[in-house]
Amino acid sequence: MRIIVTGGAGFIGSALCRYLVKEVGARILNIDKLTYAANLQSLASISDSDNYDFCKADICDRAALDLAFAEFAPDAVIHLAAESHVDRSITGSDAFMQTNIMGTYTLIEAARAYWDSLDDAARSDFRFLHVSTDEVFGSLGADGLFHEASAYDPGSPYSASKAASDHLAIAWHRTYGFPALISNCSNNYGPCQFPEKLIPLMILSAREGRDLPVYGDGSNVRDWLYVDDHVRALFVILTKGRVGEKYNIGGKNELTNLQVVKHVCDLMDEACPDTSPHKEKISFVSDRPGHDARYAIDASKLETELGWKAKEDFSSGIEKTVYWYLENPAWWAPLLQKNDLGKRLGLTGDAVVAKDRH
C-alpha cells in the first residue's frame, strides 16, 4: 500500500510514519513543510528505509502537490499537516487559517484531481483520511461525551480552523463523491511531542527545577490518548472505515490538567529524587481566553464497528512518556536552544500572572 502522509515530521505524523513503515510495511511519502514544530530526528529510525520517502513542501503549494501525486501514485492519503497549538492560534491566527483551511482545500483538490485520473478499480480503492480533533465540538459540561454526531461549537481560532477543514472533507464527499473519512481524536501525548505542549513542558520544566505553571485552577478536563494507540486507530479507519463517515478516537482517560501535572510530578520524584518534591513547584497562572472546560470522547463506534482498542491507560502511557524524555535529551535539547519555550503565549489584553502555589 502506498500512502501519502502530510505533516509526517510532526508529533503524531512521525509516530504514524514509523508505525506504517515498521509495522505495516507500507510505502510512505511524507510531505512536510518543516515548520518550527517539525523534527526530522523523530524519523531517524526509518529515514534510510526503502519504503520511506520525504518531500519538503507546503500543502498550500498546488504545483508541488500535483507533482507529488503524479510521481508517487498513492493509494491513500492521511492528512495531518496542521498548525495545532491553541495558545499560538490566539496570538497569531493567520498561519492557522492558511495551513488548516486553505492548505486542506489545496490538498483535497490535488487529491481529487489525481483520484479523477485513476481507472475505476483504483478510484474505488482510494481513500483520503482527514485527521482532526475533539476541540471542534467545543466544551462539554460535567456529564456526557462527544459523539460523531455532536454539534460543532469551536471556541478558539485553532479549533475553528479545524472545524472548517472537517467541513471541507465532508462537503467534497457529498458533492463530488470523493472518498473522504474523518477522525476526531482526544489529547495526544507520548514520545517526540514538541515541548510547548502540557506534558513534555511539565516534564522538562520539572527536570530543570523550574516552576510548573497550570492555567486557571487546573480543573479543565481532557481525555488523554497515547500517540501509538492513535496511529493504530488511523490505519484501522483508513483500511476498514466507511467512506463519508466520521470516527472518534479516545483513550477513556479523563483527567484534570492539575491531575496530569501531579502525576508527572510523582514520576519525576521517582526518577529524580534529588530535586523532589516537584509538586511544590506547581503554580497557578492566568487562564487561557475561552479555555474549554471539558472534553470527553465516545469511541464506541470505532471499537465496535472496526475492532480498535487502546492498549495504554494513562498510568502506563505517562510512565513511558516521562522516561522517554529523560532518556532522550539529544532529541529535545536542540529544540530548547532554538525556541523560547518558557514564554507565555495565548494571552489577550492585560492578563496578569497569578502567583498562587499548590
Image: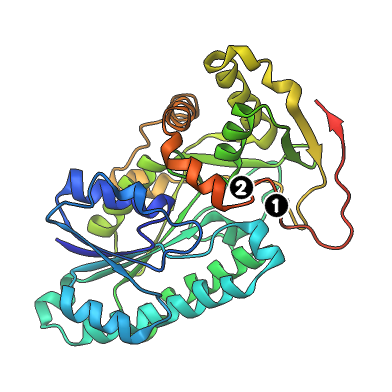
SS label for mark 1: loop
Residue 40 pos. (x, y %)? 35, 54
Check disc 1: other Cα within 10 Å, few if <14, some if 14-19, many if 20+: some
- At x 42%, y 30%, the residue is 324
Residue 309 pos. (x, y %)? 34, 38
* Residue 191 is at least partly visible in this image: no
Quadrant of the snapshot with the C terminus = top right
* Residue type highlighted by circle 2: Tyr
Q: Are marks 2 and 1 in contact (CB under 8 Å)?
A: yes
Query: With 296 as the anchor, is 23 left or right in this view?
Result: left
Query: With respect to residue 76, does 52 lie above or below?
Result: above
Q: Which residue is mark 2?
A: 295
Check disc 2: other Cα within 10 Å, few if <14, some if 14-19, many if 20+: many
Query: With respect to residue 153, does 111 lie above or below?
Result: below
Q: How much space separates mark 2 and mark 1, taking CA atoms? A: 8 Å
Q: Which residue is mark 1?
A: 292
Quadrant of the snapshot with the N terminus = bottom left
